[in-house]
Amino acid sequence: MNLGEGQASARVYNSPLNEYGILGFEYGYSLAHPEGLTLWEAQFGDFYNVGQVIVDQYISAAQEKWGIRSGLVMLLPHGYEGQGAEHSSGRMERFLSLCANYNLQVVNCTTPANFFHVLRRQLHREIRLPLIVFTPKSLLRHPECISSLADFTEGRFREVIEDKTVKNPSEVRRILLCSGKIYYELDAVRKERKINDISILRLEQLYPFPEKQLGKILKNYPENVELIWVQEEPFNMGAAVFVKQHIGDCTLQVISRPPSGVTAEGLTAQHKVHQAIILNEALNLIQD
């Protein structure tokens, strides 16, 4: 299949639901064809579970163990939409716990252009590192998840997306840090309630942690601003602990689901209740 005249070919395969075998094959294919873009997509994020040994033994560790570099891309659907435990989480915390010595790239893009640029970057630069992409399913149809043509042709991948809706950063009393689709839910409630003193920053890249990019943006806000990490996942999952460690700020608060032994609720009604609690608490709509 050709995308256009004079362009490289693209091949798409609907492989069997055998994560261990297929993920291992794609990893080997990425080594044999380093000039190509090899992507493996799980049907749902949790569905890479059976391939965990490939991630542990090869994808995250081969460079440090054997000096082998791979540009494999793993696409893991991730986002809490009330579809149950097996259809919500790509197990972000597992990948983040494996991140060290620049062995992986972990991103959670919230715009089409940023998703495009992170894939383009994967081949455009000389280094080859596995790229783990968490892809919120609902953003495929979200009316505000759009990018202009100029964002594709003139832009680049943004590790952090700052909040352009806040007119006066000096009047901001609270900054919400988040990653993924929960940004759009937080922003929707903020618009509905006409809240002007809360800013929302999106960490599009979780590892390598964008310390410099984030620090540059935070300098625009008051020193005593309240800094909060907001996530959909239970506290013991997602990026909460990872972000708290890398920011190194003991005052950083975390708003999330309570710690849990499963990734998500099994009942849609229960999901909606917990999601509402997170949004209300983050936007300070619950009175102490």
Image (cartoon, rainbow, N blue to C red):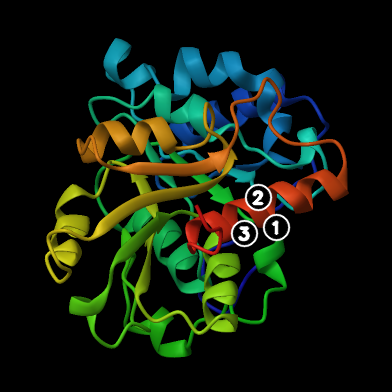
Using the image, tell me which numbered label, if any, was put on residue 137.
1
Q: Amino acid at mark 2?
A: Gly
Where is residue 40 shown, x and y percent of the image?
62, 41
Is residue 181 something that shows in the picture?
A: no
* Residue designated by label 3: 10
Q: Residues within 10 Å of mark 2 (few under 14, many from 20)?
A: many
The amino acid at mark 3 is Ala
Whether the residues at callouts 1 and 2 have beta carbons within 8 Å, the answer is yes
Lower position in the chain sequence, tag 1 or tag 2: 2
The image position of residue 32, as x and y in percent, is 47, 32
Q: Secondary structure at mark 1?
A: loop
Q: Residue at x 73, y 31 (%)?
A: 47
First in sequence: mark 3 vs mark 1: 3
Q: Which mark is residue 79?
A: 2
Callout 1 amino acid: Lys
* Quarter of image, res 233: top right
Label 3, label 2: how many angstroms apart (C-alpha)?
Answer: 28 Å
Tell which tag, 3 or 1, sits nearer the viewer. 1
Question: Could you say which is closer to the camera, residue 119 or residue 90?
Answer: 90
Report the residue at 78% width, 25% height from top. 18
What is the secondary structure assignment of the residue under circle 3? loop
Q: Residues within 10 Å of mark 1 (few under 14, many from 20)?
A: some
**Badge 3 or badge 2: first in the primary sequence:** 3
Instruction: Determine whether the residue tagged by mark 2 lies in a helix, strand or loop.
Output: loop
